Structure formats: C-alpha cells, structure tokens
Image (tube, coloured by chain):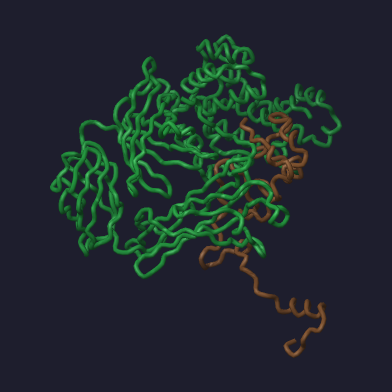
C-alpha cells in the first residue's frame, strides 16, 4: 500500500482503516495481567450502593460509568419505571406517588426533581 | 397477586405447582394450604410457636399509647411486631418514619423521641451485637463483607447489609419483614427474592429468612447479659480526644462531658482539639444522648454560624473508660473524623505525637499531645533505642514540645513511648527512606451535585510507607510512615475509546479533596451525559531524588434521589 496514494475519499477511508491512527489505551477493558494493576480490585461497594443491576445505578458491571443509562434524568423515566430502582429512586407506588408530577420532561425539568427522605 | 399466600409461607408450594397455580386463584391456593402440610407451613407453625414464647413486654405507657392503636397488645403485655424485634436507635427511628409516611401515623416529635429512646433502651442491641453493625450508624463507606454470599446478594441488591446486621428478630418477624418488602416494593420479588426458572433449591428469600433467623434471633446470651447490667453510663468528666481526619491528619484535644440536669443519659459537651499538622484549633459545643447504656448519639457545633454541625456516633466501652466512633457531616455524611476518647484522671496521658515518623540522623521538634503533662521532663521521656531526648522545650498540661535526635544508625521500626508511668505503644516510626506512597481509599466515589442535589465529595489521603526489613512492598512488615503532603492531580481512566470524562467530572484540590461538577444533563457532552465518569486520582511526592507516585480509582457518579438516611435520631 505504501506505493499507492488514495485519490478519492473512499480510497482515503480504506487507507485510514488499514493504518488506524493510534488511540488511547482503554484500560477498563483490559484483562488483569502480571504487570501493575490497571484497574482497582473489583468494584468498590460503598455504603448503600447497589451494583446488582446491570447496569447499576452508580456503577456499571465493570465498576465504571461508561455503561450507565445517561443522562440520569432521562433514566428516571426510561429505565426507572421499567427496571425499578427501589434503593435509589422513590417508588411512585407507595412512597412518593407524585414524585415526578412537576416534571413531565425530566431532561428539561430536572431542577424540580425532589429528594425523598423516607 | 396473592400476597396473603406469600405471607402464609406458601411460595414454594406455589412455585412447585406453578403451571397449575396459574390457573388457580388465590382462594384455591389457600384452600390447598389447609390440607397440604409443606415444609414452609411447618416452619411457619414453628415460628408461631416461638413467637408465643418469645417477645419483650412493653411497659411504657407512652409507647403503648403511641403504637398500641395498630399494634394490638396481648395478655403478656406485648405489642404485635414491636415486641419481637430489637435494633439500634436508627432502626427504630426509621420504623417510626415509615409508620408516619405510609401508615398515617400522627405522632408529635417529642413523643417519637420518647418512643425511640424507650425502644432503643429496652429493645436494643448489646455492645457485642452493635459492634459489627457500627459502620451503618457511623455512616462509613464499607465493602460489606458478609459470611453468607447468597444472603448478602439478596439484601444488598437494594440496601446496605448494615441494615440487616443491626436487627434481631424472631423467625416469624424475619418472615414478616420480607412480606413487608413484597407489599411495599413489589419488584423486590423479581429483583432479589426469587430466582427465575425452576429449581429445587430454596428461593433466595427463604434461604435468607432461615439464615437470619438463626444468625440474628431475638433472644441472645449477649442481650440477656447486657440488659441485666445495663444502666445509664456515668461518663461526666474530662476525656482526652484523639482522632484522624482523612487527608488532613491527626487531631488531639479534650472533651468535657457534663450531665444535663434532671436526666441520667443526656449530656452537654465542650470540645477543643488541634490539627497536629497545621496547629489549627477547633472549639465545639454539643449535646448528646446515650442509648442502651453505650450508644452515644450527639451533635456539636463550631460557633454560632455552624448550622449543620457534626453528628457524633460513638460507642462507650463497657468499663466507661473509653469510647470511639465517627463524627461526620456532608450531604452524604461523607466528611468526618474518626474519634477515640479516653477518660482522664489525675495521671498523665499521652494521646499521640507529631510528627509520627522521623528519619534517621535527624533532630526534630517533637510534640506530645495528652493530658496532665505539665511535669514532663527530658529524663522521664523515653522514646526507645536510637532516640535521644535532648531537652524539653516547653511543657503545658496538654502539649509537650521536646527536641529529639535520632541516631544515624538507629534501627528502622516503631517505637513505644514511656513518660513516667504512662505509655503509648507504637507512638512513632523511625525510617531511613520512604519506599513508596499509597492513596487511600484505593477506590473512591463522588456524586455530582450543587444545583438540585448536594454534592458528594471524596477525600483522598496519601500515606508514605517503608517496605520493612524484607524490602518488599505490601507485606506484613511494611511500616506506615503516616500522611504526607502530596501533589494531587487527575488522569483519565479510559473506559471507552475517546473517553473524555476528565474534562467534566470535577477537580481535586491541594489537600486531596475531590469536588464533583454540577448535576444535570450537560449539553456539551455526547448524549447530554451528566458530568459523571471515572478517573484516576494521582498523588506524587518527592522523596530525595525520586518522585513517588500512587493512584486511586475515582467513580464520579449520579445522585441518589431516595436517601435511606438514618439521620440524627434526636437533634439535640
């Protein structure tokens, strides 16, 4: 390929695919080897934190945030009502039936979301 | 759904007959239960028999009046549910809150306080029982190791294991509390209590109830012994304070505890302590209640402008000579100090020294903190082999300053301190070189906030270590040389290609405290992501010609909108 020069955009993309630009190391996806640890030893479980769901509320199954439903304000409706997060979001069955009554579109009205202290 | 059937302990039957059960209504299942004796019904009968014998009578008129309207009393003076459970003050408070929120209980705050106090004292935990659950009341971040992984999985799917290990119940009560979960949180069945698919193994919730009934029963030798000897502790007087604020360092000082007139378990406190590393002095005044004869719950304030104060959770030792715990504040109780108090008489007490580690060949000004130290002399101060006390520069009752020289060939290791007839084990470390530094915690967590919800901060700390005689890092002989002033920074923890969390998550200051960015969707991020992400927290520290480096993982994540927060039982 080194004697050939792409002359149109499609050829340029092929050349780019054959010689990808160096990208950053993705340590979170690496296996633990014999070298220095690239990841903390397993997900840390802080007080009250739940990692049981996949993805969890605070952390995904790798202990990071890349796999979380985002933004969380959208997650309140898209995931909460379907998946149910009893430990992190008020249940609208018993504890806070009107919890989201002030924010029909949480991504816009997120400043109206309440904290609930049962 | 047939919750009645579940409460009666018929789930295994229903699951076993599930193809049939889908065609039967609840009445038929209940009817079957009358003629089919399953293991669960046998267990339920055994639990019922136990309940007849067990149970703590409730004599207090206030509690009987406040709770008895729904919790029917029996001939033995017991109230339903309440008499068959013991827990911490926080546990009882949470129950009352739930009664107010979900069961339309109307109760005056002062009555609720009285009820909590009676129940915490008479239906509480013994010191041996409360110890393993202390982290819950102290609001510590914890990795929650637990002896039964299946039970842990069942319970920590939603909440801390501390909620469970701080409870004692009869077998029937453990069953009923799972029924309560099913009623109020129906998804708990699918998320945690049952497994999907057919299996001959007991359902996770049944295993948990069986395990917890054995492990945390209502009646225990510890509680029998403690409740017989329990009394309000006589802890008035002067106490020497030593503590540690992560990232800031050791504190030393004094607490004067004064009984509140007319009570035997309420106290006021006057506290004064100094941060050893920078000399900053803090004066606090506070109030506290001691529950169950040993559970100190208080709040103290630093001056009139301190609106939140520090909540104090401590446990008084059985001999009334010491107590320890955590004082904390913050939107998520994440900022605080570990505190230990030791009763002071007329004898000298040394609580700590600063600096806590000295390099060989150096002469340093060593500060000894404690009480009754005014008579200290160089001759009476013995720091061990290789350390010479040149002179005592100043001796005040709470602080002695001494000039100390460490020989160039002094042996590396810890030194006990003796001053007249008092001592302090491992008071200081002698080292020749700093082998490495480490950042604690090695995995931290912060939450975005500041607009609608509070921020959760994360304090990191860099500590220096000597590798010890074996020269190998992370072995048992390593010497902890204490906190060092590291330079702090953040680096990307690449979890995806093109990961750019570092730009958004927040900042770390010169003392190792990470402040997360604002909550809410960020329109500058792809998909309007929040300012969440994971990064490395990196500490660097110059040691001679080398630059030592250590790092920790930091998860900057989303808020909790439902806060199962056992806040102050009583805000004195």
| Palette colour of chain B | green
Any part of residue B457 in sight? yes
| Residue B62 horizontal/vertical position (percent) | 53, 12
On the image, the x and y values in percent for residue B80 come to 60, 17
Tell me what residue is drawn at x 67 percent, y 31 percent. Answer: B181
Give the color of chain A as drawn: brown
Residue sitting farthest toward the right: B23
Q: As displayed, is residue B113 above or below residue A17?
A: above
Q: Is residue B508 above or below residue B202?
A: below
State the residue lying farthest toward the front.
Answer: B305
B176, B315: nearer the viewer: B315
From the image, which quarter does the N terminus of chain B lie in? top right
Is B564 left or right of B22, judged from the image as shown?
A: left
Q: Is residue A61 above or below residue B11?
A: below
The residue located at (35%, 30%) in the rendering is: B270
Q: Residue B202: percent from the left, percent from the top? A: 67, 38
Is B156 in front, or is B563? Answer: B563
Report whether residue B38 is seen.
no
């Amino acid at each position: 390929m080194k004697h050939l020069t792409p002359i149109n955009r499609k050829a340029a993309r092929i050349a780019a695919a054959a010689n990808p630009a160096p990208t950053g190391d993705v340590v979170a996806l690496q296996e633990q080897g014999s070298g220095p640890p690239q990841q903390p030893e397993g997900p840390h479980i802080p007080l009250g934190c739940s990692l049981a769901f996949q993805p969890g509320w605070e952390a995904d199954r790798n202990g990071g945030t890349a796999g979380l439903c985002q933004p969380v304000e959208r997650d309140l409706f898209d995931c909460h009502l379907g998946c149910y997060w009893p430990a992190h979001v008020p249940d609208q069955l018993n504890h806070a039936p009107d919890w989201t009554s002030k924010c029909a579109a949480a991504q816009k009205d997120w400043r109206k979301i309440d904290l609930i202290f049962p | 759904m047939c919750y009645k059937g579940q409460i009666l302990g018929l789930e295994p039957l229903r699951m076993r007959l599930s193809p049939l059960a889908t065609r039967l209504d609840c009445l038929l299942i209940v009817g079957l239960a009358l003629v089919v004796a399953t293991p669960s019904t046998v267990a339920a009968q055994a639990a019922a028999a136990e309940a007849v014998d067990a149970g703590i009578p409730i004599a207090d008129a206030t509690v009987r009046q406040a709770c008895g309207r729904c919790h029917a009393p029996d001939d033995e003076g017991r109230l339903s549910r309440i008499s068959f459970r013991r827990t911490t003050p926080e546990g009882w408070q949470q129950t009352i809150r739930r009664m107010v929120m979900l069961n339309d209980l109307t109760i005056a705050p002062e009555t609720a306080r009285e009820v909590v106090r009676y129940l915490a004292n008479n239906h509480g935990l013994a010191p041996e029982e409360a110890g393993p659950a202390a982290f819950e009341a102290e609001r510590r971040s914890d990795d929650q190791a637990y002896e039964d992984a299946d039970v842990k999985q069942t319970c920590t799917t939603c909440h801390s294991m501390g909620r469970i290990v701080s409870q004692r119940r009869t077998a029937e009560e453990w069953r009923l509390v799972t029924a309560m979960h099913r009623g109020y949180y129906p998804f708990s069945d699918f998320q945690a209590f049952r497994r999907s698919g057919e299996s001959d193994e007991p359902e996770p919730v049944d295993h948990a109830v069986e395990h917890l009934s054995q492990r945390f029963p209502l009646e225990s030798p510890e509680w029998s012994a403690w409740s017989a000897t329990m009394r309000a502790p006589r802890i008035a007087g002067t106490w020497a304070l030593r503590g540690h604020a992560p990232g800031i360092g050791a504190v030393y000082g004094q607490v004067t505890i004064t009984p509140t007139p007319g009570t035997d378990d309420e106290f006021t406190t006057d506290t004064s302590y100094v941060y050893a590393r920078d000399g900053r002095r803090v004066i606090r005044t506070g109030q506290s209640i001691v529950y169950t004869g040993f559970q100190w719950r208080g709040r103290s304030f630093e001056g009139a402008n301190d609106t939140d104060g520090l909540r104090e959770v401590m446990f008084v030792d059985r001999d009334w000579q010491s107590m320890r715990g955590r004082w904390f504040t913050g939107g998520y109780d994440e900022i605080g100090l570990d505190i230990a108090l030791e009763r002071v008489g007329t004898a000298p007490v040394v609580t700590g020294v600063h600096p806590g580690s000295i390099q060989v060949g150096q002469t340093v000004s060593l500060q000894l903190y404690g009480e009754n130290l005014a008579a200290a002399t160089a001759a009476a101060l013995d720091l061990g082999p290789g350390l010479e006390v040149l002179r005592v520069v100043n001796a005040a009752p709470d602080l002695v300053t001494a000039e100390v020289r460490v020989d160039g060939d002094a042996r590396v290791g810890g030194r006990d301190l003796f001053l007249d007839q008092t001592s302090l084990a491992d008071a200081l470390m002698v080292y020749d070189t700093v082998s490495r530094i480490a950042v604690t915690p090695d995995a931290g967590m912060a939450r975005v906030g500041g607009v609608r919800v509070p921020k959760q901060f994360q304090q990191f700390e860099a500590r220096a270590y000597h590798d010890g005689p074996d020269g190998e890092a992370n072995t048992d002989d390593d010497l902890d040389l204490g906190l060092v002033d590291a330079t702090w920074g953040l680096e990307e923890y690449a979890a995806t290609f093109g990961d750019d969390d570092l730009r958004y998550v927040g900042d770390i200051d010169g003392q190792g405290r990470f402040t997360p960015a604002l909550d809410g969707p960020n329109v500058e991020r792809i998909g309007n992501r929040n300012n969440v992400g994971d990064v490395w927290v990196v500490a660097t520290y110059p040691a001679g010609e080398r630059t030592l480096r250590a790092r920790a993982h930091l998860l900057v994540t989303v808020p909790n909108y439902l806060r199962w927060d056992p806040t102050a039982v009583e805000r004195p």
